[in-house]
Image (cartoon, grey):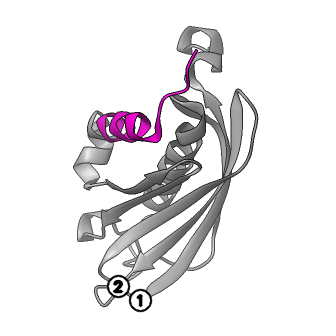
Amino acid sequence: MERPSIEQLSSFAQAILSQQPFAVKLGTRLDAFSSGHAELSLPIIDDLRQQHGFVHGGVVSYLADNALTFAGGSVLGDALTVEFKINYLRPARGQGRLIAVADVIGQSKSQAVVRCDVFVESVDGARSHCAAAQGTIVRAQSAAKPSESA
């Protein structure tokens, strides 16, 4: 089977993102996509904050997870996250947007290990590193079907 080109994968990735209702609701964008690399962002709006005014950790985690999977998918094709870990380095605060930058650091035919850094980018372009994540991504056909995981 011939491997899809990065242009085909990029179109596929944009289509996948547009089919994720949660991603669409948050305004998530695929800002960069190449072999082994993906960058996703979303605007910071008040609805995404928790009681202390920081962007909720679940939102930061969502963006990291999605960026990990998109980067892994850039080398594997259709892919799913099977595990990931996130470290919150500092609160995601302020205005602007969250940016998740993910890179494949190791891969085989069926899985990839991916690292992701999440930043708050202020309206003036300054970036503050707020989280670091790492995960294992697998080809979708090698992942357990929902009925097999119950």
Between 104 and 1, the residue placed more toward the observer is 1
Dot 2: what SS? loop
Give the answer, above or below, for where 142 lies relative to 111. Answer: above
Q: Residue at x 63, y 66 (%)?
A: 132
Q: Determine which quarter of the picture holds residue 111.
A: top right
Question: Residue visible at 41% across and 81% down?
Answer: 93
Q: Quadrant of the C terminus?
A: top right
Quarter of the image where the N terminus is located = top right
**Furthest-top residue in view?**
147
Query: In 3D space, how far apart are the residues under numbered discs 1 and 2 (Cα atoms)?
Result: 5 Å
Look at mark 1 in the image and give the residue it sits on: 126
Q: Position of residue 2 (x, y in %)?
A: 55, 20
Q: Is residue 125 magenta?
A: no
Residue type indicated by callout 2? Ser
Considering only vertical position in the picture, is 37 above or below 13?
Answer: below
Q: Whole-percent x and y of residue 50? A: 38, 68
Image disc number at residue 122 = 2
Residue 31, given in percent of the width and then of the height, sits at: 36, 59
Amino acid on which disc 1 is placed: Ala
Task: State if disc 2 and disc 1 touch (CB < 8 Å).
Answer: yes
Name the residue at 59% across, 42% down: 72
- Segment colored magenta: 1-16
Name the spot of residue 81 as percent of width and height, x first.
59, 37
Residue 4 on the magenta span: yes
